[in-house]
Image: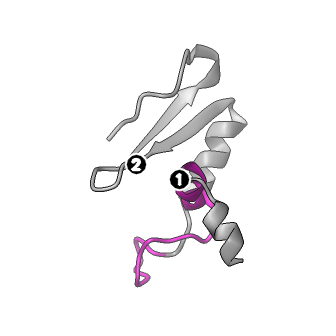
Amino acid sequence: MAEQVERLTDESILLLNFLQGISTRDAVSNLSGRGVGMDVVKSNVERIGGIVDVHSTAGSVSRAGIADRQNCRGPPTPTT
């Protein structure tokens, strides 16, 4: 398992946020921490032909973008 983790690219690590059950919260509340949400967003965007992209730089803000594949000429423009 440790070898597999070491081989993950930065992009692959960011995409882990879209797995079902993943949460960045330490505690569960009625609003967050249950690991429900981003997997549903990604699957619904992809179902209609779109793409979801995430970019992050150490020490900076992470950004996610959603784009329509038919009208996208490059990577989606990240939104904050």
The spot of residue 19 in percent (x, y) is 63, 62
Q: Which mark is residue 10?
A: 1
- Taking the magenta stretch, the answer to whether it contains residue 12 is yes
The residue under label 2 is 56
**At 71% from the left edge and 38% from the top edge, which residue is drawn?**
47
**At 50% from the left edge and 71% from the top edge, which residue is drawn?**
23
- Taking the magenta stretch, the answer to whether it contains residue 70 is no
Frontmost residue, 55 versus 69:
55
Position of residue 2 relative to residue 75, above or below, is: below
Task: For residue 37, say whether it is visible.
Answer: yes
Frontmost residue, 71 versus 74:
74
> Which image quadrant is residue 79 in?
top left
Mark 2 and 1 residues: CB-CB less than 8 Å, in contact? yes
Instruction: Magenta stretch: give its range.
Output: 11-33
Task: For residue 20, say whether it is visible.
Answer: no
Frontmost residue, 77 versus 30:
77
Sequence-first disc among 2 and 1: 1
Magenta: main secondary structure = loop
Dot 1: few (<14), some (14–19), or many (≥20) neighbours within 10 Å? few
Position of residue 79 relative to residue 40, above or below, is: above
Dot 2: few (<14), some (14–19), or many (≥20) neighbours within 10 Å? few
The spot of residue 42 in percent (x, y) is 61, 47
